[in-house]
Image (cartoon, rainbow, N blue to C red):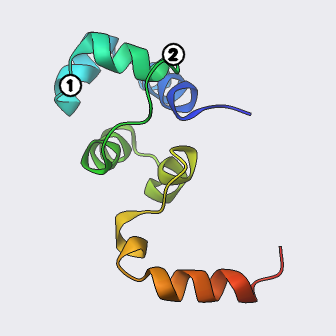
Amino acid sequence: MSSFGQIVRARRKEKRYGLIQFAERIGLSPAYWSRIERGHEKPPRDDVIERVAGILDMPLDELFIQANRLPTDMRDNLRRVVALYRREPF
């Protein structure tokens, strides 16, 4: 199973963004972003995940799933999300 950082790194390379260029574009230091991609840091803040999704043209929900957290809009309706989850057979 791939981690958040591995998935983003693969997509970044597919889109031909260099590490420094990409980190600057999302507003983080290249060293910190490199640690995220290598799995040495937890996934970044929600607003950064949203920027990453936009820049790399990735599904936002998938990135939040890879980050192991609910998308921000779902957190606002946590009661409903839990109720729907409990009803859905998996």
Q: Which image quarter holds the N terminus?
A: top right
Q: Secondary structure at mark 2?
A: loop
Residue linked to disc 1 = 28
Binning the other alpha carbons within 10 Å of mark 1 as few (below 14), some (14 to 19) or many (20 upward) gives some
- Give whichever of 4, 57 is nearer the camera: 4
| Residue 4 place in picture, x, y as percent | 53, 35
| Residue 20 place in picture, x, y as percent | 25, 11
Q: Earlier in the sequence, mark 2 or mark 1?
A: 1
Which residue type does callout 2 highlight?
Arg
In the image, taking residue 59 as reference, residue 83 lies left or right, namely right
- Give whichever of 85, 16 is nearer the camera: 85
Residue at horizontal 35 percent and vertical 44 percent from the top: 49
- Give whichever of 20, 72 is nearer the camera: 72
Disc on res. 38: 2
The image quadrant of residue 85 is bottom right
**Distance in Å between CA atoms under marks 2 and 1:** 15 Å
Residue at horizontal 73 percent and vertical 89 percent from the top: 87
Q: Which image quarter holds the C terminus?
A: bottom right
Residue at horizontal 27 percent and vertical 44 percent from the top: 51
Which residue type does callout 1 highlight?
Leu
Q: Residue furthest right?
A: 90
Q: Secondary structure at mark 1?
A: loop
